[in-house]
DNA sequence: ACTCCCATGTAAATCGTTACATGATTGG
DNA sequence: CCAATCATGTAACGATTTACATGGGAGT
């Protein structure tokens, strides 16, 4: 449901082609709403049919260095700003790791979950590292910046804080496992 | 992908019928892997065909107070404990709220996001309240309990810590909006 | 008798993932 | 020229959501 608006947002930030969008999803807005290029192309078609985006005119023949590019229409911009105002229902949490720990508790195979936890912890720590690099690169300025910059920074901070919470939690559980008898 | 294992876990904790599972998903394991009763019935069929669960024999005719009940087979238990050991890739984050804030930043409609944020904050706070009630009711004992209890408690703590992070983040963004000029 | 809820299910639509296809083009 | 990559797309499947259907039992 939000893919549509994630694309409108990204195209509002800057007009671009399908592949460019796919790349932005891989390293920016996709941290909060992942999507593959297949999803994106499909959604671009639909958004075009609905008149929410339009294709920019190509100067020459469509080719590798001259791909189809899209921009948001006035209708699209209007719909997006209306959507911003809607009361937001939190997306339900969905964590395989949590299910694994519950499974460990249910079966009594408590130490078997250690490998999963350590791997999970490492992945979260890597995410955290990526986010902090972005923060240092893009938001390290001492002067406040404008409202847009501040809001973008808050979103990145959300990613950082959530990943931090995960890393701490994994560490706590791993410590707890260390204190348990080897079974 | 994890629904299968969430059901196996829940049936390992206690055998039960489809509706019972649906209710447990609504107030326990579903906090970390939500599922509707339709998903659950379909998955129960598949798990039965794969021999991972089996139907308990009914004493009388199937009826309201005498529903079909399922338990995990030895194969199911084996598969579940093997699955516990697999290295766990974190499920990608997916947050409509984060996309909304990015949209607010991109369009410049920064104050329009306030209503969404406040509603989101309230929902997160309500989740937090529910989790804390469960903690007080089920995990308030001073003696440590066994390994299973400890692990279950850690999972609940994960929920609590993530919701706390969300509430704080919403408060920070709302404060930030208060300090910005009215547009 | 009427209504509500229980327990199970079917159906359709959308969303998301994985695998593969195609032509064009750039780099070596 | 050949391989790798770019840019776009198709196809199929699985997962998820939403809506509706049904037959029975419980309560009033």
Image (cartoon, coloured by chain):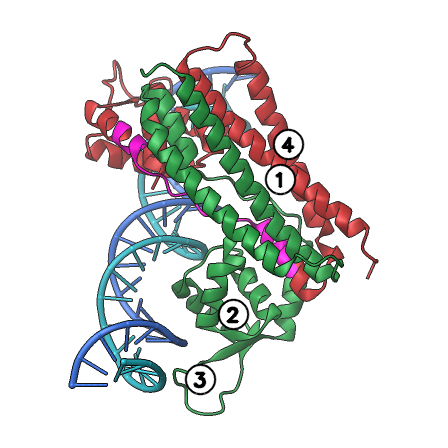
Chain colours: A red, B green, C blue, D cyan
Cα–Cα span, label 1 and label 3? 42 Å
- Judged left or right of residue B6, residue A38 is left
Query: Which residues are the magenta region?
Result: A81-103
Q: Which structural element holds mark 3?
A: loop
Q: Nearer the viewer, residue B60 or B48?
A: B60
Q: In this view, does A143 lie to the left or right of B103?
A: right
Question: Residue, x 83% and y 58% (percent of image)?
Answer: A182
Spot occupied by residue B99 in the image (x, y as percentages of width and height): 40, 32
At x 36%, y 37%, the residue is A3
The disc at residue B47 is: 2
Residue labelled with disc 1: A166
As displayed, is residue B111 above or below residue A104?
above
Helix, strand or loop at label 1? It is helix
Q: Nearer the viewer, residue D9 or A42?
A: A42
Q: Mark 3 or 2 closer to N-term?
A: 2
Q: Mark 4 lies on which chain?
A: A
Tags 3 and 4 both on a single chain:
no
A100 lies left or right of A145: right
Which residue is located at x 70 percent, y 59 percent? B141
Can you tell which of label 1 and label 4 is closer to the viewer? 1
Q: In this view, does A51 lie above or below B108?
A: below
Q: With respect to residue A145, does A73 lie above or below?
A: below
Q: How crowded is the residue under tag 2: few (<14 C-alpha within 10 Å), some, or many (20+)?
A: some
- Residue under disc 3 on the same chain as residue under disc 2: yes
Do marks 1 and 4 share a subunit?
yes
**Quadrant of the rendered image containing residue A160:** top right
Residue situated furthest right in the rendering: A181
Q: Are marks 4 and 2 on the same chain?
A: no
- Tell which tag, 3 or 2, sits nearer the viewer: 3
Answer few, some or many: residues within 10 Å of disc 3's Cα (few below 14, many 20 plus, some between 14 and 19): few
């Amino acid at each position: 449901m939000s893919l549509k608006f994630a694309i409108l947002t990204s195209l509002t930030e800057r007009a671009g082609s399908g592949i460019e969008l796919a790349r932005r999803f891989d390293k920016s807005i996709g941290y909060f709403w992942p999507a593959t290029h297949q999803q994106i192309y499909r959604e671009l078609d639909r958004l075009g049919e609905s008149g929410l985006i339009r294709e920019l005119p190509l100067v020459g023949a469509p080719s590798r260095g001259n791909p189809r590019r899209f921009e948001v229409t006035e209708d699209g911009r209007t719909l997006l700003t209306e959507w911003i105002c809607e009361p937001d229902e939190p997306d339900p949490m969905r964590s395989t790791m949590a299910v694994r720990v519950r499974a460990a508790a249910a079966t009594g195979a408590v130490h078997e979950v250690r490998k999963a936890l350590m791997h999970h912890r490492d992945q979260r720590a890597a995410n955290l590292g990526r986010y902090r690099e972005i923060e240092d690169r893009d938001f390290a300025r001492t002067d406040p910046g404008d409202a847009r910059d501040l809001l973008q920074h808050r979103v990145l901070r959300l990613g950082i804080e959530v990943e931090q919470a995960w890393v701490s939690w994994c560490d706590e559980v791993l410590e707890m496992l260390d204190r348990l008898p080897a079974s």
